[in-house]
Image (spheres, helix red, strand yellow):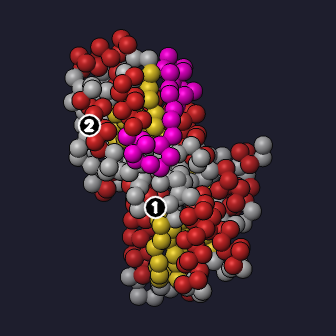
């Protein structure tokens, strides 16, 4: 339903609005970046923790978004294979609730904590408390964007690269005529900030070309990565800009909410949608022609890689500060050959 930016952006990896590709989804290569948020736990303390490691506490952004449910389920499955008990709770997009969950994990003495930060900065105090308790903190999908606490490793989609793919798809979609575009954002979440940044940079570069059909981003609204908020934001955009040509939504839930708003207003044939995620519902909407395409994510790989990094850390191996999983564009032709849609 998050995370400098450019440093990844060599080969990284925040609310659901969601705050996720090919015919048969490839297993993308994973690479770590050189920038470190760091951890102060010594190798000796890692070894001590290794002897008692039993439980990983995971506070997800939300579990109503299928994307985060896949991450949680994969972590639980992969963790069980290695003898971990993965305890999953939902932050419900509420940083105060998530902070309480982290404090509860600390009291229970978990061996590691994993977060999808509900607020990329405000979660810092909770991370610091975990640091002080000697518990390593990892993040996935949404990056911690503060300085108060330290994270061992962040695992995520290369959201900046995925945003650029969305921008390229928009340029291709609108062609020589260009047109007015609305963006459904989720500015509280770092991963969504990166998606919009990548999208915007591609559109601006396109508009700088002398003969290009200009793409005019006329409004950026907070769709909160959720269907209801996406519906409301898209409805507002259509009413303010009745000649809107297209819409970029930062995830599938907000894209699907926008699609419902377009259908309710009789604009479904006029306004085209580009989403982001590649959740089953999003893929089905692409197959049905309701969404043009998605830069897709691989939440199962994200969950698996998170467990990999935790295991490496406790074995005393070097762990990169960031691991980014590249995105790829997914169109109707891909959906038509996707085994996941043939079940």
Which element type, helix, strand or loop, lies under badge 2? Answer: helix
- Measured as percent of width and height from the top left, residue 164 is found at 45, 64
Image point (38%, 34%), residue name: 102
Question: Any mark on residue 104, and which?
Answer: none
* Distance Cα–Cα, label 2 vs label 1: 25 Å
Q: Observer-nearest residue: 280 or 34?
A: 280
Q: Is 266 on the left or on the right of 247, as rendered?
A: right
Query: For the magenta stretch, what is the residue range?
Result: 75-99
Q: In the rendered structure, does residue 81 fall within the stretch colored magenta?
A: yes
- Quadrant position of the C terminus in the picture: top right
Q: Is 339 on the left or on the right of 306, as rendered?
A: right
- Measured as percent of width and height from the top left, residue 132 is found at 24, 29
Question: Is residue 242 visible in the rendered structure shown here?
Answer: yes
- Measured as percent of width and height from the top left, residue 7 is found at 29, 52
Tell me: residue 243, above or below residue 126. Answer: below
Q: In the current view of this chain or complex, which residue is farthest to the top? A: 51
Which element type, helix, strand or loop, lies under badge 1? Answer: loop
Q: Observer-nearest residue: 278 or 117?
A: 117
Tell me: residue 113, above or below residue 64. Answer: above
Question: Any mark on residue 186, and which?
Answer: 1
2 or 1: tag closer to the N-terminus: 2
Residue position for label 2: 128
């Amino acid at each position: 339903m998050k995370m400098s930016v450019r440093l990844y952006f060599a080969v990284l990896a925040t609310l659901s609005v969601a705050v996720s590709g090919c015919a048969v989804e490839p297993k993308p290569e994973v690479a770590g970046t050189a920038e470190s948020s760091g951890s102060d736990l010594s190798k000796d303390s890692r070894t001590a923790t290794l002897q008692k490691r039993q439980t990983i506490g995971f506070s997800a952004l939300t579990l109503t978004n299928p994307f985060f449910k896949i991450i949680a389920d994969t972590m639980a499955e992969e963790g069980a294979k290695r003898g971990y008990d993965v305890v999953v709770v939902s932050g419900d997009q509420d940083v105060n609730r998530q902070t309480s969950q982290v404090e509860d994990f600390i009291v229970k003495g978990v061996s590691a904590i994993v977060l999808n930060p509900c607020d990329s900065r405000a979660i810092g105090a909770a991370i610091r408390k975990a640091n002080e308790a000697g518990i390593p903190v990892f993040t996935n999908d949404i990056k911690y964007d503060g300085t108060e606490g330290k994270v061992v490793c962040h695992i995520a989609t290369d959201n900046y690269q995925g945003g650029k793919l969305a921008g390229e798809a928009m340029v291709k979609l609108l062609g020589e005529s260009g047109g007015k575009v609305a963006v459904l954002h989720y500015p509280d979440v770092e991963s969504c900030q990166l998606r919009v940044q990548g999208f915007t940079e591609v559109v601006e570069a396109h508009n700088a070309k002398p003969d290009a059909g200009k793409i005019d981003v006329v409004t950026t609204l907070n769709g909160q990565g959720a269907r209801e908020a996406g519906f409301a934001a898209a409805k507002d955009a259509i009413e303010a800009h009745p000649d809107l040509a297209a819409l970029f939504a930062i995830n599938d839930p907000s894209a699907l909410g926008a699609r419902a708003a377009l259908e309710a207003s009789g604009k479904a044939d006029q306004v085209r949608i580009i989403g982001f995620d590649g959740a089953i519902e999003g893929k089905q909407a692409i197959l049905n022609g309701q969404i043009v395409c998605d830069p897709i994510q691989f939440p199962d790989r994200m969950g698996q890689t998170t467990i990999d990094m935790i295991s490496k850390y406790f074995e005393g191996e070097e762990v990169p500060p960031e691991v980014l999983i590249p995105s790829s564009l997914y169109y109707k032709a891909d959906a038509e050959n996707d085994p996941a849609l043939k079940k």
